[in-house]
Image (tube, grey):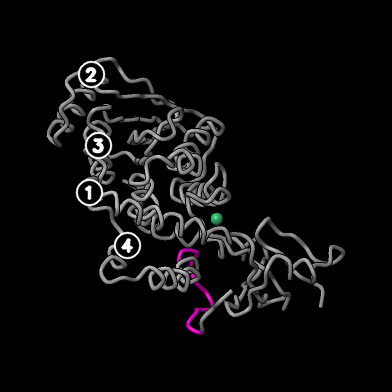
Amino acid sequence: MSTSSSFPSYASSFEEFERILDPCFSEFVIANSDGETALEECLPYLEGIDHSSAKVINRLAWCDNLLDIIKDCGRNWMRGDGVLTRAQYRKRLTCKKWYCEDCGQKNGRVHSRRFMRLNHIWGPITEKSACGQLVITVPDGDRFRFLHKKGPSDLQKIARKVTKKFFPGRKVVQSFQAFGDTNLEKFNPHVHSAIEFAYGETLKLSLEKLVEIRLYVAALMKKYGCTYDGDYDIHWNYARGVKQVQHMLRYLCRPNPGPDNRKALTDNPELLYFFMSGMSRFKYIRYYGFPRNLIKDSAEAADELTVFEKLAGEKIVWDWQDVISQSELELVWNPLVDERLSNDLLRMRSP
Ligand SMILES: [Zn+2]
């Protein structure tokens, strides 16, 4: 694996991924360079959905290239040194992309990291925890209105207006999901909002309140340009106690789109490109009403390197220059003395 001397000794997983990919990106751009086309291929956003088929072919190539790069996910191991014990560690290098079958799957790395962040911000989930969940879905004929660079954010803003009006002062975790459970290739933007309730509070909503919410959503959607005239799809459910609340919040964190959507989207390269490239830095999960410092700390608390130091019980200094392949690792791995601390972290005791 190619590395450069500018690698930091300690970096967040995202930086790690970007830096590792950087040489691959340059190669791709140069290889496809013919004047401005190459630059267009690098544009991070899909500007609209009415592009010529020639550009679609380029987008497909771009997506293929990303998929090609992440084929290396999990196959290389970076060295770390324990500050306390001087033990040598090996950390699996992974891509942490939703479209990776390993990282993006249910309970995979992306999902786990999001849930870990949520746990840090939400606080301990106990038998006395309770939350309600409001799901707002865009009517079929109006979904295309949210299919542009700002569309998913706009839908999140609409959902936030609703929770602010009907559940003022409460803590809310919001998640944008792009597809439904059954039709994996059909763009079906919806927002889940989990709302914190106190123990013993009524979680059922009256019919009057549900109707009020539905009318307000309809008004906001129409203001946005939606033309649907029927009853808007508003779903309310709730959870109590560790098991139910955890289940609800974990589901809310799942990557959507996920690898299954990617596979289903083969006939729709525009949509695939939109989520693989244009939405690559999009904040799918948003928090409202929680202390700012908790939200800020959560990125670090859920960072892989922080989690690994906890697992190891000591600070680890990572060496980005020292990366070995899976087969090289197998040659030095000694099952008698070496430990597997997790699927992605090893402690090597052998000399
Ligand atoms: Zn991956």
- Where does residue 277 sit, x and y in percent of width and height? 36, 55
For image coordinates 32% across by 46% down, the residue present is 288
**What distance separates the C-alpha of mark 2 from that of mark 1?**
29 Å
Q: Nearer the viewer, residue 17 or 344?
A: 17
Pick the quarter of the image with the N terminus.
bottom right
Which residue in the structure is indicated by mark 3? 144
Q: Which residues are magenta?
A: 5-14
Pick the quarter of the image with the C terminus.
bottom right
Give the residue type that dot 4 points to.
Glu
Q: Which mark is residue 231?
A: 2
Q: Quadrant of residue 25?
A: bottom left
Ligand 1's quadrant is bottom right
Give the residue type that dot 3 points to.
Phe
- Where does residue 73 sit, x and y in percent of width and height? 58, 59
Mark closer to the chain start, 2 or 3 = 3
Which residue in the structure is indicated by mark 1? 48
**What distance separates the C-alpha of mark 3 from that of mark 1?**
11 Å
Q: Nearer the viewer, residue 226 or 153?
A: 226
Helix, strand or loop for disc 4: helix
For image coordinates 45% across by 31% down, the residue present is 130
Mark closer to the chain start, 3 or 4 = 4
Helix, strand or loop for disc 1: loop
**Is label 3 in contact with label 1 (beta carbons under 8 Å)?**
no
Q: Please, is residue 212 above or below residue 149 in the view?
A: above
Q: Is residue 12 magenta?
A: yes
Which residue in the structure is indicated by mark 4? 41
For image coordinates 37% across by 33% down, the residue present is 186
**What distance separates the C-alpha of mark 1 from that of mark 4?**
14 Å
